[in-house]
Image (cartoon, coloured by chain):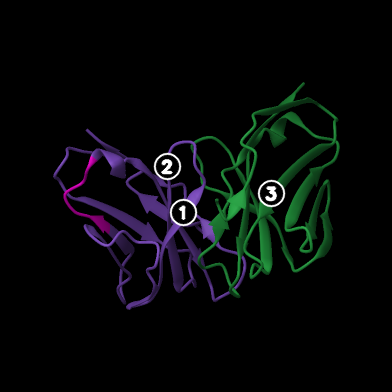
Chain colours: A purple, B green
């Protein structure tokens, strides 16, 4: 059973470009969470999604950031018009239900130049 | 003030030592407490979780929660070089894994 798959592992974008981060949850998991980890900081919750629904987006910046988890395919975290401050590691986690054990992916490291 | 405070270290101990890692928190609504281990350039891996106060033991790892003091601990016995990693505490006020609030993480090195 493959774990949570995130791609790409590394992403370089110029300021003003768009970044798309993908997350495929573990098989059988219908709950997806996105977290951001800035250098020398802990992980910060961004958004919680179930299939086709955003359940809690209280950690998402109000502008430029959006997330989706369609009926088919991976969850996507989209960052428009990236700025240097968006440079961070973005982690996706999934769980089979609202249980305690969420499994994290390896992360996507976004660098904005 | 951060909701969860964790000393970032670094912490360096000799192999075989008992390691104590701690977090304090300010939100009395937190009910679920977790410890994650994160190796360099990898995703966090759940080590243990506890509900409310008390102790939980799993092999060489023991987690303690003292809600009256808003203080949680992770003890590692007979520490091994493979335990070298960053340890993150996390907690939640809701049932489930969503919206975990993480500490900054403590970087631990076990020296052979």
User: Residue tagged by mark 2?
Assistant: A38
Instruction: Identify the residue at image location x=49%, y=72%.
Output: A28
Relative to A5, B101 lies left or right: right
Mark 2–mark 3 Cα distance, whole angstroms, equals 19 Å
Q: Residue A38's quadrant in the figure?
A: top left
Instruction: Identify the residue at image location x=33%, y=70%.
Output: A69
Q: Chain of mark 1?
A: A
Q: Would you say residue A19 sits in the magenta stretch?
A: no
User: Residue tagged by mark 3?
Assistant: B23
Q: Would you say residue A82 sits in the magenta stretch?
A: yes
Closer to the chain start, of discs 2 and 1, is 2
Instruction: Identify the residue at image location x=73%, y=29%.
Output: B81
Mark 2–mark 1 Cα distance, whole angstroms, equals 8 Å
* Circle 3 residues within 10 Å: few <14, some 14–19, many ≥20: many
Q: Which residues are magenta?
A: A78-83
Q: Secondary structure at mark 1?
A: strand
Q: Residue A101's quadrant in the figure?
A: bottom right
Q: What is the total number of numbered labels drawn onto the structure image? A: 3
Q: Secondary structure at mark 2?
A: loop
Which label is found at residue A44? Answer: 1
Disc 2 + disc 1, Cβ < 8 Å: yes
């Amino acid at each position: 059973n493959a774990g949570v798959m995130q791609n790409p592992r590394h992403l370089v974008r110029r300021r003003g470009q768009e970044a798309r981060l993908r997350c495929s949850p573990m098989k059988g998991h219908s709950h997806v969470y996105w977290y951001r980890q800035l250098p020398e900081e802990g992980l910060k919750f961004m958004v919680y999604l179930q299939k086709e629904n955003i359940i809690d987006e209280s950690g998402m910046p109000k502008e430029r950031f959006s997330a989706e988890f369609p009926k088919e395919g991976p969850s996507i975290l989209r960052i428009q018009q990236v700025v240097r401050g968006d440079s961070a590691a973005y982690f996706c986690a999934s769980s089979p239900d609202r249980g305690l054990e969420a499994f994290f992916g390896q992360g996507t490291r976004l660098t904005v130049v | 003030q951060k909701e969860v405070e964790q000393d970032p270290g670094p912490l360096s101990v000799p192999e075989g030592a008992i390691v104590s890692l701690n977090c304090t928190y300010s939100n009395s609504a937190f009910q679920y407490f977790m410890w994650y281990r994160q190796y360099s350039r990898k995703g966090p891996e759940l080590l243990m979780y506890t509900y409310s106060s008390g102790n939980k033991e799993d092999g060489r790892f023991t987690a303690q929660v003292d809600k009256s003091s808003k203080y949680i601990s992770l003890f590692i016995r007979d520490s091994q070089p493979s335990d070298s990693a960053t340890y993150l505490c996390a907690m939640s006020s809701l049932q489930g894994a969503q919206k975990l609030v993480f500490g900054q993480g403590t970087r631990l090195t076990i020296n052979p």
